[in-house]
Image (tube, grey):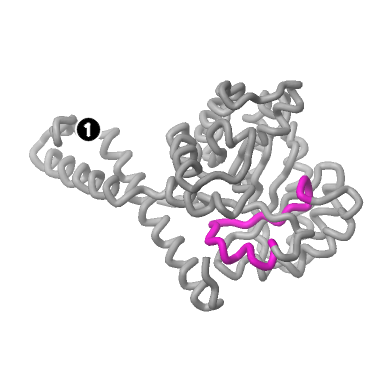
Amino acid sequence: MAILVRRSNLMVPITDAELVNHAWRHNADAITLDLEDGVAAARKAEARGLVKAAIVPAGRGAAEVFVRVNKSSLQADLEASVWPGLRGIMLSQVESAAEVTEAAEIVTALERQRGMIAGSLGFIVLLESARGVWDIRAIITASPRVTQVGLDESDLAHALGIVPLPEYDPFVYARGRLAVEATAAKVNPVGMAYPLSALPREMPESEVHTLATKARNLGMKGVICPHPGWVRPVNAAFTPTAELVAWNQRVREAFAAGVAAGTAAVPLDGKMIDVPVDEWAIVVLATAEACAARDAAKRAALATSGGRH
């Protein structure tokens, strides 16, 4: 069972040399070098010139490396970003399938020109407008490169002309639709729970963990992290706990024993274990194994690089 483990994706402004140089130390599953919101308009051209040299250093800790590009300068940003070592592109402000198709065509040509494996780069799609949310199904199925999709709730609030208040979540529908549509299309939905989703800021790890756990239980598969302090609690929230693993191992054992005895429903600790419960146990255990393998790869890379986090 193929499980995409991209629990945390740390956003790093490409023009902040210190953040870029230290990003690999934070144990994120992915690092996104930001050419968009994190870069002042006057520095966009300069920022493009920094990307190629930053890709390999950003991946020193075995993080997947992405670049977030500008919709208004897509061609130039992609030409600056598509180089060996890159894992993919984060497309911002996507509103139509045509935009995804256009980006895919440009990336395909660049992969060919630069000796990269065709189709090797994936897309993370950000929806930031009412139209983007409305057309989500067409957008996320426009290219097999799309592996994740999320909402930029701060920009979505601006597009809708609302001011998010901490006590009221205005994006219950949008986030729910994101989870349902993406899961149906076998694309991973990503996002944090409210209010951090629309009002991102640094918070104690315990609070980030609580909201990241809520996001997981809402159907999200990972979080785009605006602060390094989010990474550890997000990774923990999206990794099956030892207790959950132990329970699901017992589920599998009990179900197998029931099948061997000629029944497809067996009791376990006061609960009935049937086919759907066993199938979910398989997913949980596969996720735990994939997370463990991902963490082992990162530890090995950090040890080789002499890093710590």
Which residue is at 60% across, 48% downward?
Answer: 225
Q: Nearer the viewer, residue 250 or 279?
A: 250
In the displayed structure, 1 sits above or below 167; it is below
* Span highlighted in magenta in the image: 19-38
Query: At which x and y percent is residue 92?
Result: 73, 41
Q: Is residue 73 magenta?
A: no
Residue 309 visible in the snapshot: yes
Amino acid type assigned to the residue bearing label 1 in the image? Asp
Q: Position of residue 115 (x, y in %)?
A: 73, 68
Left or right: residue 109 compared with residue 259:
right
For the question of whether residue 120 can be seen, the reply is no
Q: Residue furthest right?
A: 42
Q: Residue 246 at what x, y percent from top left?
A: 24, 49
Foreground pick, 263 / 84: 84
Residue 83 vs 222, above or below: the answer is: below
In this figure, what is the number of numbered marks?
1
Left or right of 247 in this view: 23: right
Point out residue 160 in the picture as x, y percentages from the top left corner. Answer: 74, 22
40 relative to 199 in the view: left or right = right
Q: Residue at x 51, y 29 (%)?
A: 180
Q: Is residue 21 magenta?
A: yes
Dot 1 alpha-carbon crowd within 10 angstroms: few under 14, some 14 to 19, many 20 or more: some
Q: Which residue is mark 1?
A: 274
The quarter holding residue 258 reads top left
Q: In this orientation, which residue lies closer to the viewer: 255 or 149?
A: 149
Residue 55 image-quadrant placement: bottom right
Provide the secondary structure element on which disc 1 rests: loop
Residue 55, compared with residue 229, is above or below; it is below
Q: Residue at x 55, y 30 (%)?
A: 181
